[in-house]
Amino acid sequence: MTASSALLTDRYELTMLQAALRDGTADRRCVFEVFARRLAGGRRFGVLAGTGRLLEEIARFRFGDDELDFLREHAAVDDRTLAWLADYRFSGTITGYREGELYFPGSPVLVVEGTFAEAVILETLVLSILNFDSAVATAAARMSVAAGDRPLAEMGSRRAQERAAVAAARAAYIAGFGATSNLEAGRVWGIPTMGTAAHAWTLLHDSEEDAFRSQVAALGVGTTLLIDTYDIREGVATAIRVAGTDLGGVRIDSGDLPLVAADVRAQLDELGATDTRITVTSDLDEFAIAALAASPVDAYGVGTSLVTGSGTPTAGMVYKLVARQDAEGSWLGVAKASAQKASQGGRKSAFRVLRDGTASEELVVVSDGFEELDAAERHPDARALHTALFADGAPVDGHVGASGVRAAREHHARAIEELPVRALALSRSEPAIPTVYRDAE
């Protein structure tokens, strides 16, 4: 049986539901919106990830006997609310940015429409997934920019909670990484997996040479040998003596990487192993990768910094009510006016304005009427950003599973090509393009 996601939520979502059932507002039609007030960590763009995972979890958001028994035993809600939850199925619609899309402050990346009751209780689940996955994807995209054409492998599973590790591998792949060390991510999401040996393999054997010979015998000369367990120069010499000049690669996991990589490349070339590739690991982030741009490095493996968002572990997204019906059924735009936490009310459509194929503006059009949104035809110089994600009680085809991950990866590659050159710098700065709000005509 597929596990329910219904209790992956905060209690106050259900206490609001109980109060709304009591005062008669539970069935009011509402529009909730997910956005980031600012780009976390002073980044110049953000990358949306987690959408496909979220859609699958919403489909599993059911209150079965176990969930209802827990709520009953802990007096979390009253009997009327328990009865309502027993029949819960999200019957509204979800639209939003495609997974892998770039976002900026105020970008309405997800729009959830339904009754207050059925939409409000999704808040915690929505933010839990999108905030983590988007933080990882944004870090991964910056690392991919820094790496250029050199491949990146995700290897951070040992630095994250076990399920978060799988989600991180997925987000990193969408944002440009080419492989993961995590087998579950490979099984579930179709991500290529990789891996050879750790230092423990060398330490297990009586000598480094014995370890290398055994690895080559098992995996072939195309394998990558870890050369820094002891002395790196001796490790390189031993690796080539064992595997020959057709050795696939060597990995360096310590030391002053620019200097070490240069020395290793020179030694490999001297030994005739000119095609043996050099992979570096050792606590890399986007800045370390950029610092290695001129070094003879062929590939990178990234762990801790990636799965923790490279110092920015959450995207800072919020889930806010932006429109609702009143007691007579008329639509009203609503918004917070709190200091430094104000939101923009109203139902919205979003467009990426392009000038000669380069993004110049995030245009968010606020509709006065709530039945029809601003049409894409009115913005011939822009790309419409919203697409249908969830309808008729199920995810829309093309967004979930391994095929959804591949589609998100392809979309991200196209979207990042639209960025102006200044957006690719790693330093803290203002968003690469401004977000402009405009009332619908």
Image (tube, rainbow, N blue to C red):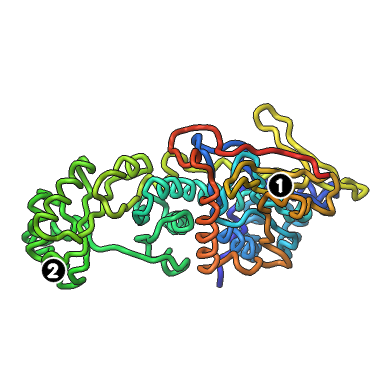
The residue lying toward the viewer, choosing from 121 and 428, is: 428
* Residue pointed to by mark 1: 15
Q: Is residue 101 left or right of residue 371?
A: left
Q: Position of residue 394 (x, y in %)?
A: 67, 67
Mark 1 secondary-structure assignment: helix
Q: Residue at x 36, y 52 (%)?
A: 156
Seen as rendered, the residue at the extreme right is 328
Q: Residue at x 18, y 46 (%)?
A: 262
Q: Is residue 208 visible?
A: no
- Give the quarter of the figure containing the N terminus: bottom right
Q: Is residue 185 left or right of residue 363?
A: left
Q: Position of residue 354 (x, y in %)?
A: 63, 47
Tell me which amino acid carries mark 1. Answer: Thr
* Residue pointed to by mark 2: 214
- Give the quarter of the figure containing the C terminus: top right
Query: Within 10 Å of the Cα at label 2, are there few (<14), some (14-19), or many (20+) other Cα atoms?
Result: some
Tell me which amino acid carries mark 2. Answer: Ser
The residue lying toward the viewer, choosing from 126 and 282, is: 282
- Alpha carbon separation for disc pair 2 and 1: 61 Å
